[in-house]
């Protein structure tokens, strides 16, 4: 029980430091990254094994903004997932095809260059009808549901999102995949 509380507190500190480190340069960035290594080492040492997920379970995180991909990767890696990333829908489809045996959830940004999230969603859904897919956007959920309500999505994640909301939706989407697949 104590280790669960410690891991949660360290995880929150890790996410805050990671975010500030991505915004910093020079000595400050270097020092923050060193602190992150120390925190991650402590987290891995005290994390209860029951909270770890199978390393064969991957999440594909797709967003055209590098900072969003980094933050998403840090959150999901901390949750024990292997995280694959793509910067647009075209890259996402290629990565999915190469790793479809282990990808259990795809997080798609709605607005991206080359191939947007909705177009990528439709192609993914054709090849994997039961794949857990979460749509991220700065638009309100009501607007998205009105425009795309008939789609088989496992969730909407409004930007900026919290670590807790991302983790919860991914877990639910993977549960959907396990039930349906």
Image: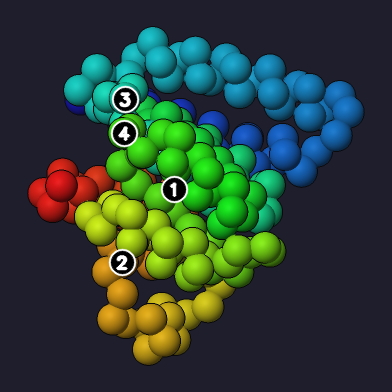
Instruction: Name which residue lies at 53% across and 20% down.
Output: 39
Gap in angstroms between the C-alphas marked 3 and 4: 9 Å
Q: Which mark is residue 153?
A: 2
Above or below for 178 versus 25: below
From this view, report whether residue 105 is shown above or below residue 109. Answer: above
Please name which of the two marks, 3 or 4, marks the residue nearer to the observer.
4
Q: Are marks 3 and 4 in contact (CB under 8 Å)?
A: no
Residue drawn 13% across the image and 52% down it: 180
Residue 118: give x, y in percent of width and height: 48, 70
Q: Name the element at disc 3.
A: loop
First of labels 1, 3 by sequence position: 3
- How would you rate the neighbour count of disc 3 (Cα within 10 Å): few for under 14, some for 14-19, many for 20 or more? few
- Pointer 4: what residue? 101
Q: Evaluate if marks 1 and 4 touch, with contact meaning CB atoms under 8 Å apart.
A: no
Name the outermost residue toward the left.
179
Residue 71 placed where, x, y %? 57, 43
Q: Is residue 82 visible?
A: yes
Q: Which residue is mark 3?
A: 56
**Mark closer to the observer (1, 4):** 4
The mark that comes first in sequence, 3 or 2, is: 3
Instruction: Tell me, yes or no, whether the two marked residues, 3 and 2, touch with CB atoms within 8 Å.
Output: no
């Amino acid at each position: 029980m104590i280790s669960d509380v410690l891991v949660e507190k360290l995880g929150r500190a890790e996410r805050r430091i990671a975010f500030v480190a991505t915004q910093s340069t020079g000595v400050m960035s270097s020092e923050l990254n060193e602190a992150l290594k120390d925190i991650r080492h402590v987290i891995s040492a005290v994390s209860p094994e029951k909270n770890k997920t199978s390393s064969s379970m991957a999440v594909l995180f797709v967003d055209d903004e590098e900072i969003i991909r980094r933050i998403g990767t840090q959150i999901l890696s901390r949750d024990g997932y292997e995280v694959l990333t793509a910067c647009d829908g075209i890259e996402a489809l290629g990565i999915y095809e190469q790793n479809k045996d282990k990808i259990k959830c795809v997080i798609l940004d709605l607005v991206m260059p080359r191939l947007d999230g909705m177009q990528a969603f439709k192609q993914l859904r054709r090849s994997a009808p039961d794949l857990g897919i979460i749509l991220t956007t700065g638009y309100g959920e009501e607007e998205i549901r009105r425009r795309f309500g008939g789609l088989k999505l496992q969730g909407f994640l409004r930007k900026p999102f919290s670590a807790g909301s991302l983790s919860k939706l991914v877990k639910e989407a993977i549960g959907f995949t396990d039930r349906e697949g």
